[in-house]
Amino acid sequence: MKKQFPKRIVERVATDCRNSYKLRREDFLFKVTGSVNTFNHTKMWDGGEYRDKLYTSVWKKMALFMLFHRLKPDVCIKFLFDDRIRRGVTHPTLPTHIATKKNLASLKRVMRAEKGKVGLQLQIEKEICRRFISCDAFDVGMVGEDAVEYALAEAIGLSPLFKYCMAANVGLTDICDDEYEEALLQFSSFPEDYMEHWVAWIPIKLIEDVSYAIEGG
């Protein structure tokens, strides 16, 4: 049976794919041409009716491809544009050429390299948060829960999953709500690895929700 993903997750990843493609395409063209090129895309890519024809969103197709193969959109899209630079290709790849079987092996290799960073990532983010609380938050007179909330809002380098877990551990429910979907997506990318290295850090609710999402609930 074909795997199904919650509609809100697909929509969120589709938005991430579109935003990443725009950013990486413009960066690619700047490196190639030396000038800024604004992203002007065809309306067909967004889906819907265009010139009396009905199109499926290319971003939705890309999102489903990323979700099914547990790929991170920005990591993969950046890799494909960087690879064109390495090969001396001077025109950008089209979004319709990204989510293909031809690219899958290369994208999986890129993701395997990302997996090795999961354990180290937690230690780095803990240290970022600790330093922010002990220095920046302390300097403005914040302590305890207020200091944690300030760190999660202002510190640079904290991932959605870390913010969600930290907020859940101290009872900051508003931050949990804000970070939930991005944390779910991050956790879903490498569930086994996060469970190995972050298991004591991740709330049981998120573990259950990720299992449900992966199974196509």
Image (cartoon, grey):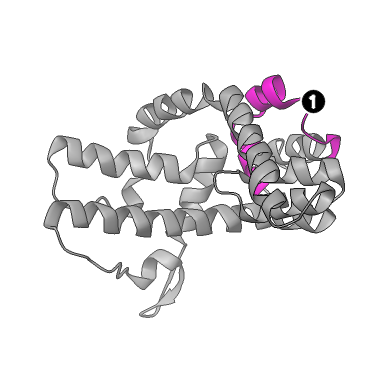
Query: What secondary structure is the stretch in magenta mostly built from?
Result: helix
What is the x, y in percent for residue 115? 53, 25
Identify the image quadrant of the C terminus: top right
- The residue shown at (80%, 59%) is 174
186 on left or right of 149:
left
Q: Residue furthest right?
A: 171
Q: Which residues are magenta?
A: 181-205
What is the x, y in percent for residue 179? 70, 52
Q: Is residue 185 above or below residue 126?
A: below
72 on left or right of 158:
left
60 on left or right of 9:
left
Query: SS at mark 1?
Result: loop
178 on left or right of 63:
right
What is the x, y in percent for residue 13? 55, 52
Queried whether the magenta region covers residue 69, the answer comes back as no
* In the foreground, 69 or 210: 210
- Residue at image mark 1: 200
* In the foreground, 85 or 136: 136
Few, some or many residues within 10 Å of mark 1 (<14, 14–19, 20+): few
Identify the image quadrant of the N terminus: top right
Queried whether the magenta region covers residue 199, the answer comes back as yes
- The residue shown at (59%, 35%) is 189
Kind of residue sitting beneath label 1: Ala
Q: Is residue 151 above or below residue 45?
A: above
* In the foreground, 217 or 167: 167
